């Protein structure tokens, strides 16, 4: 028997160089194709990236959504500034850059999130923006446009939106209910989750077209993983927007909620310690200790 | 009849000098390992005393052994449902303080101490934490009645001994102690095995050794609490329970266990006992006073043809039957009836036996002189009549060896004393008179039996002391392997050390 098992292993060893050869070839091909793609930066590619990452908040020549209309932005701003800003907006906001500060003031203090793009992606987007700006007339940089890109043709129902938000009705494509991460004062136990921002007055911050676009494409880095493959239906989007509109007048609840959490946790801890205190003296003393202490 | 064989050890307490050689031999052989520092599979206790772990006989605290409820035995530790409810919290375990915190000394202090007027000392440090330790107790802290005001007077076996006698035992002229060496009793009805939730403890078929399967042990530690003798120990390093294995690797190669082999006083005997497994359930549920008798009845006569046929039917080798016929354990326990199991009232049916110790007569002070509390002449004969004049109270010995039945102890003491009187008259006084023979027959002995007891007690050679039959491991090996191949390969390969959680 041992002879057979050894020959088996010899056959296996013979395949190893072949396997290494295959892996090596595959690696070379992969590297070549990747480097080749750097040379083929085109406006089409830029457009594709723009649609995937930017279109939920920005338009080109169709007016302001959450963020500004980017028609003619390449003429308006220095190209290097644009590159740096798109690559890492947080750094720009944090460094107190005057243009970034002005943008914050103009757009309800909403910061553009880091989209995780590469330098090559940014370059492609800029080429796309340059080409499209050249093709059309610059649009006004302020003022909400009447036309929205993903304007739903359906009418929203605030009650249905609330049920979607709380998870009472599950989302049609299987996405996670909003309440898991977001809160709205007056919904569910303790108003909802605390991972994402409070959405009580989200309409004021985003504006209705911006909000609709944002929940239609959910292009936020944290949410894209959850909703990328399970988008909301147009009906759900308009229901949620209606719900957000209805709750827009309520006061933001985050401050009182922190106090509530602390209060409940503290209360439970006090009760636990009180119970421990009752049982503490009943802890078993070793018989040896009792003997030496003369307590036996 | 369901005849089985058992390797039993027998301790002749009159011969024990309390030197602890057995404990050290066992320690060096088996428990000189990480996690086993505190374990003494074999220990020697001074009696009266509290033993190791402290007051292990106090079952109201440790809850070991069996309890007779009506006609049924149940573990004192817990019921089935109770055991499940308390499976993650077993409050009856001895603490480290009940055993003792193992310690060593920082000998480097002797070399590193700065020059000074005093001799440097090596301070004691804990073997668990490595920190300096104020040693409060040890495995033999009350050796030779050390600290007897605390320890000896709190011996649970003094229950039922009158206040008067207990007070006397503290007086210098009447003080008395003896030694009690203890190993696992390899019981016929082991409470440790019954309490194990994992089914890891089993009793070997061929010789009755109770073993822990460390591959199955899951560290519930119910065995530690359930064993009334506190002879299962938990290894905190491997996360497994361990216990005395009766040195089975030595037995299988024809050697006596290390404790017995190293015994200076040659107090230990090893031999085969044949017993009837069918009688165990009924023998374990008799009233306390009848426990010893019932236990003796479970042990079978190896000369009885019916027993021999039953043994052969159960696959017991002829060499084992022959060993049972020559067994010193059989002679002392059954034929002569002078060896008793330790604490029969635990109802685990312990298979290690003890010959209780004789003790001097109580002395009194007359005219500022010590004097035996007996008439001037014929001292020894009077002690035979007045066992209550012995320094160790009969009640105390009965609590240890006969579940409180004093009559059993008196019979054994009479036999031991009769042999002593007979031999003294024969060798010292030169003549055996009718009085001496009268005491022999009163104790239920004949001259031949007395001579045989004397010979096996004082002059046995090693072959008579340890009658260990051939183990015929090859017949067991056949179950899974070619015995010849096994013989050639044994010792090769990797040993898999026990691992926590596996």
Image: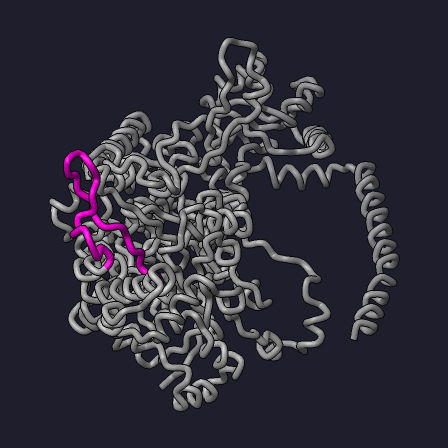
**Quarter of the picture holding the C terminus of chain A:** top left
For residue A139, above or below residue B348: above
Q: How many labels sit on residues?
A: 0
Pick the front one: A52 or B247: B247
Give the x, y percent position of residue B111: 59, 20
The reply to whether residue A240 is visible in this rendering is yes
Give the x, y percent position of residue B177: 30, 46
In percent of the image, x 30 and y 62: which residue is there?
B421
Q: Is residue B308 magenta?
A: no
- For the record, the magenta segment spans B354-380
In percent of the image, x 30 and y 50: which residue is there?
B56
For residue B425, above or below residue A65: below
**Quarter of the picture holding the N terminus of chain A:** bottom right
When asked about the image quadrant of residue B498, the answer is bottom right
Left or right of B153? Residue B195 is: right
Q: Is residue B378 magenta?
A: yes
The reply to whether residue B348 is visible in this rendering is no
């Amino acid at each position: 028997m041992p002879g057979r098992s050894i020959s088996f292993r010899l056959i296996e060893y013979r395949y190893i160089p072949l396997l290494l050869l295959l892996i090596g070839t595959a690696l070379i091909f992969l590297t070549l194709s990747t480097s080749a793609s750097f040379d083929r930066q085109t406006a089409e590619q830029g457009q594709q990236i723009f649609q995937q990452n930017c279109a939920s908040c920005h338009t080109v020549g169709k007016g302001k959504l959450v963020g500004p209309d980017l028609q003619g932005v390449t003429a308006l701003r220095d190209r290097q500034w644009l590159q740096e800003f798109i690559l890492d907006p947080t750094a720009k906001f944090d460094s107190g850059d005057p243009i970034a500060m002005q943008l914050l003031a103009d757009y309800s203090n909403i910061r553009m999130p880091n989209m995780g793009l590469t330098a090559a992606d940014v370059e492609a987007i800029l080429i796309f923006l340059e080409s499209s700006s050249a093709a059309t007339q610059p649009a006004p940089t302020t003022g909400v446009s009447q036309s929205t890109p993903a304007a739903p043709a359906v009418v929203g129902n605030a009650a249905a939106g609330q049920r979607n938000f709380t998870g009472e009705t599950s989302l049609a494509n299987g996405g996670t209910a909003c309440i898991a991460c977001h809160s709205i004062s007056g919904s569910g136990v303790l108003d909802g989750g605390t991972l994402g921002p409070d959405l009580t007055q989200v309409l004021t911050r985003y504006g209705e077209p911006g909000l609709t676009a944002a929940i239609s494409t959910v292009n936020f880095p944290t949410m894209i993983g959850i909703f990328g493959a399970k988008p909301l239906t147009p009906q759900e989007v308009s229901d949620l927007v209606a719900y957000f509109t209805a709750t827009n007048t309520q006061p933001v609840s985050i401050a009182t909620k922190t106090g509530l959490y602390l209060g409940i946790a503290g209360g439970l801890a006090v009760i636990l310690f009180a119970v421990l205190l009752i049982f503490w003296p009943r802890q078993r003393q070793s018989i040896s200790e009792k003997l030496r202490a003369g307590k036996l | 009849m369901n005849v089985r064989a058992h390797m039993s050890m027998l301790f002749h307490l009159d011969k024990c000098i309390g030197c602890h050689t057995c404990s050290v031999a066992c320690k060096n052989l088996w428990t000189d390992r990480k996690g086993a520092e505190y374990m003494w599979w074999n220990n020697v206790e001074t009696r009266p005393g509290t033993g190791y772990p402290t007051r292990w006989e106090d079952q109201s605290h440790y809850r070991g052994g069996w309890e007779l409820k009506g006609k049924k035995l149940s573990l004192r530790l817990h019921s089935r449902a109770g055991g499940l409810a308390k499976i993650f919290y077993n409050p009856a375990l001895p603490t480290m303080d009940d055993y003792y915190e193992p310690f060593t000394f920082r000998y480097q202090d002797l070399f590193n101490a700065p020059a000074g007027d005093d001799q440097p000392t090596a301070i004691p440090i804990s073997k668990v934490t490595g920190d300096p330790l104020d040693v409060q107790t040890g495995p033999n802290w009350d050796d030779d009645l050390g600290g007897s005001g605390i320890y000896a007077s709190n011996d649970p076996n003094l229950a039922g001994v009158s206040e008067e006698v207990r007070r006397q035992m503290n007086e210098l002229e009447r003080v008395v102690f003896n030694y009690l060496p203890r190993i696992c009793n390899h019981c016929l009805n082991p409470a440790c095995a019954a309490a194990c939730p994992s089914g890891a403890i089993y009793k070997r078929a061929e010789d009755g050794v109770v073993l822990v399967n460390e591959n199955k042990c899951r560290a519930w530690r119910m065995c530690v609490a359930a064993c009334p003798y506190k002879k299962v120990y938990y290894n905190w390093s491997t996360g497994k329970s361990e216990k005395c294995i009766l040195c089975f690797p030595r037995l299988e190669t024809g050697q006596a266990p290390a404790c017995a082999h190293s015994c200076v006083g040659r107090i230990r005997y090893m031999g085969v006992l044949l017993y009837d497994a069918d009688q165990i359930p009924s023998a374990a549920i008799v009233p306390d006073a009848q426990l010893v008798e019932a236990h003796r009845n479970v042990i079978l006569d190896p000369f009885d043809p019916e027993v021999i046929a039953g043994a052969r039917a159960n696959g017991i080798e002829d060499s084992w039957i022959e060993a049972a016929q020559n067994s010193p354990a059989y002679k002392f326990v059954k034929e002569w009836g002078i060896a008793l199991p330790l604490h029969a009232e635990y109802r685990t049916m312990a298979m290690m036996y003890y010959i209780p110790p004789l003790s001097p007569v109580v002395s009194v002070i007359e005219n500022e002189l010590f004097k035996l509390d007996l008439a001037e002449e014929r001292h020894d004969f009077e002690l035979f009549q007045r066992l209550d004049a012995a320094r160790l109270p009969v009640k105390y010995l009965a609590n240890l060896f006969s579940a409180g039945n004093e009559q059993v102890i008196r019979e054994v003491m009479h036999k031991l004393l009769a042999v002593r009187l007979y031999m003294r008259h024969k060798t010292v006084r030169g003549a055996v008179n009718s009085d001496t023979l009268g005491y022999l027959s009163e104790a239920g002995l004949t001259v031949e039996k007395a001579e045989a007891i004397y010979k096996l007690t004082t002059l046995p050679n090693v072959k008579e002391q340890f009658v260990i039959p051939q183990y015929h491991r090859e017949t067991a090996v056949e179950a899974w392997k070619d015995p010849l191949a096994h013989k050639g390969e044994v010792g090769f390969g990797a040993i898999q050390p026990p691992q926590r959680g596996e």
